[in-house]
Image (cartoon, grey):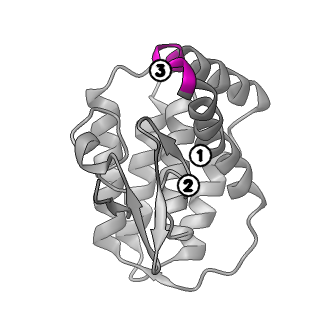
């Protein structure tokens, strides 16, 4: 079986290479194509995986962390499917191609289950949030240990953990538009 995640990345890169201008509508429609392959069972599986992975997070932060990741990745898939806004803005071809290559590399170098749709949901959410919504991947207000949160100040987004996670395998920090906040 061809790995669906890698096929998705290659499809995105192929479509990007064939178009002179990459509009938000084109990207949103590409995202919708793959979001339509996500079932409620895939979302339930992703939720279970999030809960399992969060069992190692300090107890006082665990529930907020679980809620945050469900909102960031699972609810974003629903947002993609229902988004009918008109995005005529032009997206930089190199930026989005680089982001997809980064996500593809993260996947290849990670320990992902090629049968799970969770990595696909993460990729879709990351591209949608960064290039369509032009927001940080972790929503404003997302809490991190140490009582720190993703913040917006004067139209810019700041994350307290971006720099410390930029080289973490499978992290999406390296494509997120948030800047490192002053700690």
Could you tell me what secondary structure mostly forms the magenta stretch?
A: helix
Q: Nearer the viewer, mark 3 or mark 2?
A: 3
Q: Position of residue 60 (x, y in %)?
A: 56, 24
Q: Quadrant of residue 68?
A: top right
Q: Nearer the viewer, residue 83 or 153?
A: 153
The answer to whether any part of residue 100 appears in the image is yes
Position of 26 relative to 81 (above/below): below
Q: Residues within 10 Å of mark 2 (few under 14, many from 20)?
A: some
Return the residue at label 2.
139
Is residue 5 shown left or right of residue 166?
right
Q: Identify residue for label 3.
A: 57
Return the disc, 1 or 3, that comes first in the chain's sequence: 3
Q: Earlier in the sequence, mark 3 or mark 2?
A: 3
Residue 80 drawn above or below residue 73: below
**What residue does disc 1 label?**
72
Query: Which residue is at a point 60% across and 65% down the rendered structure image?
Result: 28
Mark 1 touches mark 2? (CB < 8 Å): yes
Residues 139 and 84: in front is: 139
The answer, for residue 116, to whether it is visible in the render is: no
Mark in front: 1 vs 2: 2
Residue 12's disc number: none
Q: Tell me which segment is drawn in magenta.
A: 53-60
């Amino acid at each position: 079986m061809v790995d669906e995640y890698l096929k998705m990345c290659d499809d995105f890169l192929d479509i990007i290479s064939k178009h002179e201008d990459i509009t938000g509508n084109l990207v949103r429609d590409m995202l919708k194509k793959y979001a339509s392959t996500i079932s409620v069972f895939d979302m339930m599986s992703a939720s279970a995986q999030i809960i399992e992975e969060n069992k190692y997070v300090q107890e006082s932060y665990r529930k907020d962390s679980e809620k945050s990741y469900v909102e960031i990745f699972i609810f974003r898939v629903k947002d993609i499917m229902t988004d009918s806004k008109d995005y005529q803005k032009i997206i930089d071809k190199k930026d989005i191609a680089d982001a997809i290559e980064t996500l593809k590399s993260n996947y290849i170098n990670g320990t992902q289950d090629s049968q799970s749709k969770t990595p696909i949901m993460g990729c879709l959410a990351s591209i949608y949030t960064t290039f369509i919504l032009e927001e940080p991947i972790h929503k404003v207000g997302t809490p991190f240990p140490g009582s720190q949160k993703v913040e917006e100040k004067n139209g810019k987004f700041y994350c307290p953990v971006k720099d410390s996670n930029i080289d973490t395998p499978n992290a999406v920090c390296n494509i997120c538009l948030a800047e490192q906040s002053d700690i």
